[in-house]
Amino acid sequence: MGTTTPPRTLAEALRARGDDSLAGLLRARPDLLNPVPNDITQLATRAGTRASVVRALEHLDRFALQTAEALAVAPDPAPYDTLLSLLTGDGLDDGEQHDDAGAAITAALPGALATLREQALVWGEDDRLRLVRTARELLAPSPQHPSPTGLGPTVAEATAGMSPGRLQEILTATGLPATHDPVSAVAALSALFTDRTRMAELLDSAPVEALSVLDRLVWGPPYGEVTPNPTPPVKWLRDRGLLLPVSTRTVVLPREAALHLRAGRAHRVPEPVPPAITAVAERDPQAVDRAAAGQAFTALATVEELLKLWNGGGPTILRAGGLSVRELKRTATALDVPEPIAAFWVELAYGAGLLASDGETDERYAPTPASDEWLDLPAADRWTHLATAWLAATRTPGLVGGQDAKGRALSALGPELDRSAAPDVRRRVLALFAGLPPGTAPDPETLLRRLRWERPLRGGPAPGAPAAPSPGGTTSGGGPEGTDLRSRLALWTLNEAELLGITGRGALSAQARALLEEGERAAAVRLAPLLPEPLDHVLLQADLTAVAPGPLERPLADMLSVLADVESKGGATVYRFTPGSVRRALDAGRAATDLHAFLAAHSRTPVPQPLSYLIDDVARRHGHLRIGAASAYVRCDDEAVLNEILADRRSTGLRLRRLAPTVLASQADPGPLLEALRDMGYAPAAESADGDVLITRAGARRTPPRTPPVPVPEGPPVPDDTLLGAAVRAIRAGDTAATVARKETPDSPSSPGPSGALPRTTPAETLATVQAAAMTGATVWIGYVNADGAASQRVIAPVRVEGGFVTAYDHTADEIRTYPLHRITGVAELAEEA
């Protein structure tokens, strides 16, 4: 048995993998599946494209990324020991790197390397580790973008193009033997910088000021500006090659010298272990569940109130989309919450499909038909619906009030609030919560630190992006920590989870844990016993108020919201009866007898006499005046009432005139006229063209049926096992078609060509070969051109050949297909494996 030949390319390394390993690659990098690659070579090519590599790097944790960064500055290929040394150092530093840190790196490196191999960012055996070329280009240093490690180019890279005379001057200054060969000169200088003993002797002879210059460059950025007449310390360093010129005004500290000063470490602080999440408090889990349930009940009440507020047609929509600042303030005042929280509730209802645009000419927001179905659900099911919608939503209400890239204000329900990273951040934050013991409230700062360790590149600049120049001509690398989008999304998640009742007193509730792990049904079962039971009664009081000692049943709450105004909220809601609220109930078609019966049926206390008098008094005057369209008119059987209206100065703006003893005409529309007379203390009723009283019922305005907005996923979705299995089989079959050995037919001038070329045979040969394969059950390799002219190679097992068609099992597509014989360019038998 011969020895296994090490892979020479990424394609060969992928070809040597098992099916489970290939499926793991496609699961980790689902963008490689769109579309399914034809073969392993195409898969390897796609895995090396810049966009795909950037996406893969963004999904690495900090230590896996540090491992890739170390490989980017290591020789290519690099042995495992060299990589380990770049992460742990050579042990000759000043004590910054402790033994326990080195042990942690040694223990964590195999796992990080396995992750990089699984994602096809690194390939090769441990003695020849290779970083994918695109990743090396993104992570390796260059004048345009310093390496994330802060290291500069090697001596060979920095001296490329330098004159031999200048190289001789550097060798002479460092005490190295002169040579006229530039390659030998560069090698000698590199050997000096990597020799611990000789390098230490050279630095011992350096001026103190020169060492200070090196200290400022050693951990990056390695570039600095110099003047035409540099200071003596800089000149000393430049003469000895410790600073090499990049341009007429820029110098760089070569990588070998920097690694000596760093004691061989590529990173100042390697982070092999994820930072721990500390707790700010350990709370009673049952108290956490009760607190979260209480907030969940508040969330339901707030969303219900918002739907009632916009029941008859909500605020108009801005031309650019969304709510105006004034409408958001008005909504916040009505909900009795700050504007940012009002924006959250509005966005939550919108994302859950409960609010939408009505699509009319005067476009407004209004409840959807789905809101009525939602209101009919049990309270626990209503909460799980909201929580599930929140988890999946890409809408980010935390951005409301900020500005977009063009300086325009971001408004609630506006089109610019979608952020594809939001669902991933929310679920990751809650997953970290779920990993803590029940009742543990984590420290937000340590939680953010953990998130940044898990995805250090997300939200910051992409690898290889130019960094901002800093004063003095150097370049500062690294993304903004704490101000990136993912950190802000995480902080918003903490606040929103508390508002929604996902967490209680800073800790994850049991019902939220059930929602994440088991689904909506399990969460509803956990939450239901913690929510108060709705009541079927109120307590009427003599001061024209009613007290609801808890949540009310839907019919009672709906009727009471029409008959009375909410005066205060809390554990008990206080309603106040006023002439306006009673008139509102009468306008909705209720008679005075109906209102008396309703109150008597739902009050645990006797109906107070003042309330009965109020209802009777308003009912007596209700509809005494009639408003219709002339533009508008007022009619009343009592002439004295009309005389009183005409004499009232407040009616001047209505421009009323008498048409008959019992009729006044107005140039105002019926609606404004109706409201104006009500403001004057009258109780008019609107009437139709037939003279019938118009009844205005609450909740008459609904949008057309609407599906909630589909969240925009961040990147391609993770494929399921079925798709992965089919994709791997298709790639294997396509690879077989492209690489399998084929029988030669030397007597035919159109025998199979080189690997990758379509086979060419005459029609007669093609027909004879596929017929023979159908009879023997053999598998053949064909070239095929479809109706669009696209050529492909396929491995098929013919089953039937008739009528100019061949029906065969296509190993590439993993299904039975029928091919016209005239579109088959050629056929070749597969050679038997030795």
Image: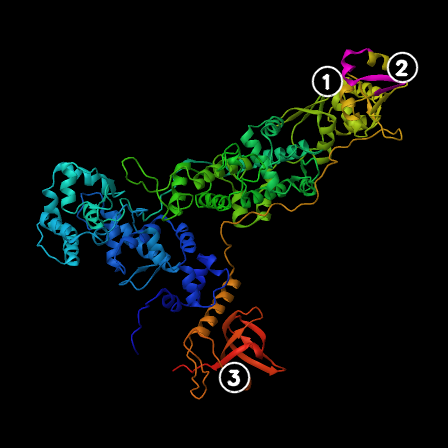
Between 109 and 540, the one lying in front of the other is 109
**First along the sequence among labels 3 and 2:** 2
Looking at the rendered structure, the secondary structure element under dot 3 is loop
Q: Amino acid at mark 1?
A: Ala
Q: Amino acid at mark 3?
A: Thr
Q: Position of residue 48 (x, y in %)?
A: 39, 59
Query: In this picture, is 142 found above or below 333?
Result: below
Q: Which mark is residue 125?
A: none
Q: Which residue is mark 1?
A: 542
- Relative to 375, 390 lies left or right: left
Point out the frontmost of discs 2 and 1: 2
Is residue 457 among the parts visible in the rendering?
yes
In the rendered structure, does residue 650 fall within the stretch colored magenta?
yes
Question: From mark 3 to mark 1, how far is it between C-alphas?
Answer: 104 Å
- The scheme the figure's colours follow is rainbow
Q: Which residue is mark 3?
A: 762
Local packing at callout 2 (Cα closer than 10 Å; few below 14, some 14-19, many 20+) is few
Q: Position of residue 804 (x, y in %)?
A: 61, 81
Q: Which residue is mark 2?
A: 639
Point out the frontmost of discs 3 and 2: 3
In the rendered structure, does residue 60 fall within the stretch colored magenta?
no
